[in-house]
Image (tube, helix red, strand yellow):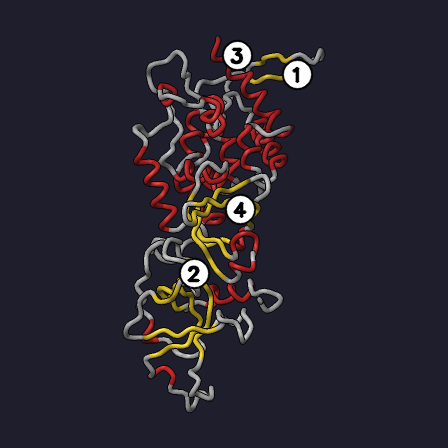
Amino acid sequence: MLLFFVSCFSFILISRSMSCKPLLPLRNQLTLLSPFPWGQFSSFLMSFFRRIKLNQVLVMKPLKKMTTGPSQVLQVEDFPGEAKVSLLDLPELTLDYILERLSPAGLCSMAEVCSSMREKCRSDHLWEKHMKQKWNRLIGDAATREWQCQLASRKRPSLYGLDRRKGFDKDLLFSVWPFTWMRPNLEGRSNQPRSAFPVDSIMGLYLSLENGKFWFPAQVYNRENGHSGFMLSCYDAHVSYDSQTDTFQARYLSHGRRTVEENIPWDRLRAPPISTPPHDLHNSDCINDLRPGNHIEIQWRKSKEFPYGWWYGVVGHLESCDGNEDRCRCHYSDNVILEFNQYPADSRWRRTVINRREHREAGTEGNGFYGGIRKLSTNEEISTWKRLWPAHVME
């Protein structure tokens, strides 16, 4: 009898909440503009239930159909001989087809209705598509390693029991817990909950990115809001997503001084294209292939205590060359001219020379130090730098 009342009451709340307001606080945290129409989806479920005279609401024990009598009070009627059908009785492929078309917020909402649906809605194959659509460009090898390190540092695969640690903030735990009914009773239970939040799943990574709890390594173009001292450069940082503004904040570490930048749009971020740490010299394997007209990125830092940033430039012609492609022999020379055309012709930053055979970190405290070189080979990388080109020549 208790199960009957709990099931009926849960169904009424879920049906009304899906058509009137978000089911979960999590959907407000995600702030996703879901491509799936929630009102239509709620209507679809309701019409589906009416059409098959549903007597079982996402639970395996049959229930009785509820109708409204003349006094507008819910009454219970029996339907002898009718088959007891649930949404879970749909063919597996049909149900998967529906779930694959839900937004992340939709999957979270559907996962709230029963344990069987919860297991289906947090499957990796459903969340992998959403990860690729939104985060594939930014979550590279470095961010993946960072996430794996965070998982490895946790003593248990779930968040249960962390309140025993000194200084643990339970409100923080509940703010990232995706489903209210999945919150463990941290006060009076000694056993782990039967269904813990799958922090080591793709769903766990996605939600940690969306709620801004996961700071991951990335690189920021034109750091510090396009400050002239960083124009056409790209620096390493740890970034966090702000779902309210659909922007990022970044933390830079330069010579022991932490710098924070906010409101960074998506198009000023990229995943680190190589695994070289920001304080290490990149092993240049393209120097012998460089020729005039090639687009490159080169490491540069102000002093040896600072991390490198990547700066955009092009390979130029030697002074002895007239620039004619038919007569150009610059690619046979040991010296390579690198040009940074965002600076005026008389600027000390306009050109530099490197040696193909003996290239190492070179420079002075006054002009900075040049490091390793990357040759840009894709149109996407080149077009990104051109899009960031300053409107005026820098002084």
Q: Residue furthest left?
A: 357
In the image, 299 versus 349, the foreground residue is: 349
Element type at mark 4: strand
Q: Mark 1 points at which residue?
A: 68
Q: Where is residue 109 in the image (x, y as percent from the top left)?
A: 52, 31
Task: Looking at the image, tell me whether mark 3 or mark 2 is earlier in sequence order.
Answer: 3
With respect to residue 193, does 335 lie above or below? below
The residues tagged by marks 2 and 1 sit, at their Cα atoms, a distance apart of 69 Å
* Residue at 34% in and 82% down: 333
The residues tagged by marks 3 and 1 sit, at their Cα atoms, a distance apart of 16 Å
Q: Mark 3 points at which residue?
A: 5
Specify the amino acid type for callout 2: Trp
Q: Residues within 10 Å of mark 1 (few under 14, many from 20)?
A: few
Q: Which residue lies furthest to the bottom in this view?
A: 327
Task: Looking at the image, tell me whether mark 4 or mark 2 is earlier in sequence order.
Answer: 4
* Residue at 54% in and 24% down: 54
Task: Looking at the image, tell me whether mark 2 or mark 1 is earlier in sequence order.
Answer: 1
With respect to residue 243, does 291 lie above or below? below
Task: Looking at the image, tell me whether mark 4 or mark 3 is earlier in sequence order.
Answer: 3
Q: Quadrant of residue 50?
A: top right
